[in-house]
Image (cartoon, helix red, strand yellow):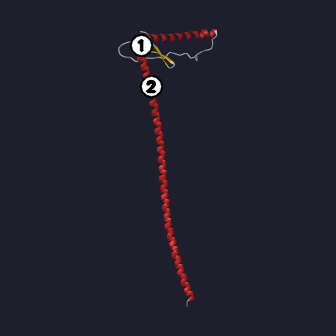
Amino acid sequence: MHGHFFQTKADVHVIVFEQGHGDTGLAMRPLPILDGSDVRPPLALRDWVQTLPATLQETRTAATALRDLVQDAVYLDEECYSSAVEHTHYHEKLHVQQKRVHDLENEAAALRAELERKDELLTAAAARQREAQRQIAELQQELENNAVVFRMHYQELLTRNEEIERLKTVIEGLQGGP
């Protein structure tokens, strides 16, 4: 049996199993990656005296953590390692699919909100159209009423005009008469 370490993306992980009965999951812890952002300027001699104990303590802590990782590591055969890698790939695919579902849910929510906004605009436009139609009907009724009143006044004027003509004829007949 030999141990396997595998790498995903930028972090290095160690496959760790608890030894015992039953199936246990993988416990992977990322190892620190030095990227140069932690580089400090050179220290003077007296600064070394002050910082050395802290640096030694950090080194001890890091060495202890590394020792614990190595002690916790379980050596796997090729079949176990392959199944762990396959499990990791399935987990990554699942994560991608869950993210896609989440993105689609967000997109659906945005579309529902847009649909509601357009429905509100449509409802408001329909209300404005109904109000405009009501005003048009009101104006048509007013025009029809005015037309009726105009016809009545016109008829009244014709009647008075006829009466005036009749009276003129009577007056002319009376003036030329006796």
- Marks 1 & 2, CB-CB < 8 Å contact: no
Residue 100: where, in percent of width, then height?
46, 30
Residue holding disc 1: 78
Q: Three-letter amino acid code at disc 2? A: His
Asked if 67 appears above or below 156 in the picture, the reply is above
Asked if 163 appears above or below 133 in the picture, the reply is below
Residue holding disc 2: 95
Residue 15, by quadrant, is top left
Q: Three-letter amino acid code at disc 1? A: Glu
Residue 82: where, in percent of width, then height?
42, 16
Residue 144 in sight from this viewpoint: yes
Residue 164: where, in percent of width, then height?
54, 79
In the structure shown, which secondary structural element does the residue marked by tag 1 occupy? helix
Query: For the residues carrying marks 1 and 2, which lies nearer the camera in this image?
Result: 1
Q: Which of 39 and 121 is in front in this view?
A: 121
Real-space CA distance between mark 1 and mark 2, rounded to the nearest whole angstrom: 25 Å
Q: Which of 39 and 114 is in front in this view?
A: 114
Residue at the right extreme? 44
